[in-house]
Image (cartoon, grey):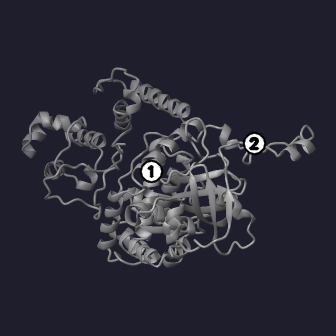
Amino acid sequence: MALPPIQALPARTSPSPRLDSGEAAESWDGVVLGRRLRHLRTQRSLTLDALADRVGATASHLSLVENGRREPKLSLLSDLASALGVSMDALLSTEAPSRRAALEIAVEKAQRSPHYASLQLPTVKITPRMPTEVLEVIAGLQLELRRRMEEQAATPEEARRANVELRQEMKACGNHYPELEQEAQRLLEAVGHADRPLSHHAAADIAEHLGFSVHLVSGLPHSTRSVTDLKNRRFYLSRVGTPGHEPRSVLLQAIGAYVLNQGEPEDYSDFLRQRVYTNYFAAALMMPQKQTVRFLRTAKERRDLAIEDLRDVFGVSYESAAHRFTNLATEHLGIRCHFQKVHESGIIHKAYENDEVLFPSDHIGAIEGQQVCRYWTSREVFDVSDHFRAFNQYTDTPNGTYWCTAVVEGHSSGLYSLSIGVPFDDARWFRGKDTTSRSVSRCPDPTCCRIPSPELESAWGGNARPAARANAHLLAAMPSGAFPGVDEVEVFQFLQDQTERE
């Protein structure tokens, strides 16, 4: 399949652009820049012709810039700033110069969005004579229309479809993204940490290299793991930490979102893809590809591959080590594999495969929320008394025999098993290949583990009335908003409070 392109990966290593560059100013919002330029020009009672004469451009070219239809070169921006008597920072500010300009920007951006284009409606030409009240109404209608479209789309089924699409993409490329690996390697080399595990101090070095400072705060918005202040170039993390997420990985994910130039997600599918890419990028920083591949190849030569060793060497969680193994196993070791994160109830929370293991799925191919066969390693591990070491097992399935290794970890929502599995022939490369534990799974045949035995049916059929525990997330719509589940008002107020404390 043709993979969608990963978002642009500019090497954003300096907080300010070079003014002698002839490149276009592609990193700024053209609509906002245009409105600021028009505001500053009219404030000084300059016509387009007069300003054009001062900077050696044509009035028609400046008109296109003011309307957000043309990206100016940095040299022209420098000349415009000088001609208007302002700094480059003032000219390139992301803030609208007035309430009127803010409305014009909102309407213009809405009309250029895919949401608006899908409606096949004509666009409204914004002129200086258009009453501000009309802009208020148009902007309000567009905002409400987008909110309703997002609310309609953000259903559990839409989320499952998005997961299916993303999982297919990951399978097609063996869960390996060379562009992300290369970008992580460049950043590691830039701060002198290209070939060793990444410490917390080194993570802070990366933030500083990018022109950001790191701040630990007590009142981080409850719906967030981190907040990035692009205006003041700060990363805010929780002082008390986030359950299940150590500070280093949270910071690296925030850095990843910035370096990968991720903007506001277009939809829930885009939101999921951005999250996968930032998690991948963070893992590529914590477990650099060159060093990790060298470590894994050495272990494979000894026929002693073990996820727990990868975890211990790089000082990461077992889940992070397992995910990283799936990134590199097929591309660099020639090993196809699968990963599962399963709740103690038997429900799949996360999963990936490129070894043709037969995951349970619904009619659209979604596996999240499905129940795993009780004879799989990811379920059997919960019944093992020794949770200090990994549990290994061979399982015969309709698609062949698989060897799997699994551990159990606690979380606020209960116990989860984390497992990595490979086809029988590849078990020879792993520690634990000599396990005597073996099971047989006939799933998806319902007689395997989903239908009571004749003895149990005879004893209890018609005599049991269980009260099912309703999973609210299966019934409710996904949280709406640009970043699902995030309270935008709370985030903006948090940033305002932090700025006022300075």
Image marks 2 and 1: residues in contact by CB distance under 8 Å: no
Image x and y of residue 444, in percent: 65, 44
Question: Element type at marker 1?
Answer: helix
Say whether residue 338 is left or right of residue 342.
left
Quadrant containing the N terminus in the rendered view: top left
Q: Nearer the viewer, mark 2 or mark 1?
A: 1
Residue denoted by label 2: 470
Which mark is on residue 171? Answer: 1
Q: Residue at x 62, y 52 (%)?
A: 397
Can residue 237 be seen here?
Answer: no
Can residue 472 be seen here?
Answer: yes
Label 2 – label 1 distance at C-alpha: 32 Å
Identify which amino acid the numbered label 1 is placed on.
Lys
Is 360 above or below relative to 149?
below
Identify which amino acid the numbered label 2 is placed on.
Ala
Is 6 above or below relative to 248?
above
Q: Nearer the viewer, residue 121 or 284?
A: 284
